[in-house]
Amino acid sequence: MSYQTDRSRVSGLGSAKKGTEHWVSQRVSAIALIPLAVLFLYTFIGTLGDGHAAVVAKYAEPIPAIIAVMFILVLFRHLRLGVQVVIEDYISDHTTQLRMLILNMLVWRGVAIVGLFAIAKIAFSA
């Protein structure tokens, strides 16, 4: 028999008031990825078969570099949000869940930083 009130039993459980924000953010990033992916692929496919110098010259131009940067930023944010949902839904141990969420954030941000560095190196070295 528990002498706790209903409020004290559920304290700390339930909504963290971030679900709607997360859902909207993921949908906005998904919608933004549609034109960004088309523009990025158009630029990228145009350089297929060309040599290294041609690809570097193409991404040294401001518009293709900006499109690539925006694509990388939105893509890896969208991936981080998606993997976060999977972790929250399928890992029940709170300690493991926290570790996986931190790892998720570090991995996707790390990969995005590497991609941004590569584009910056191409854009500013030419």
Image (cartoon, rainbow, N blue to C red):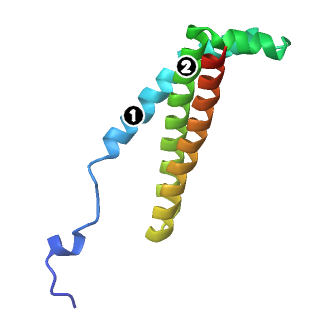
Specify the amino acid type for callout 1: Ser
- Give above or below for 42 relative to 70: above
Question: Dot 2 lies on which element?
Answer: helix
Q: Residue at x 21, y 69 (%)?
A: 11
Q: Is residue 71 left or right of residue 126?
A: left
Q: Is residue 53 left or right of residue 74?
A: right
- Give above or below for 4 relative to 116: below
Q: Residue at x 59, y 24 (%)?
A: 120
Which residue is at the front of the view, 119 or 104?
119
Q: Residue at x 64, y 12 (%)?
A: 60
- Give above or below for 34 relative to 106: above
Q: Are marks 2 and 1 in contact (CB under 8 Å)?
A: no
Residue that mark 2 sits on:
34
Residue that mark 1 sits on:
25
Specify the amino acid type for callout 2: Ile
**Label 1 packing within 10 angstroms: few (<14), some (14-19), many (20+):** some
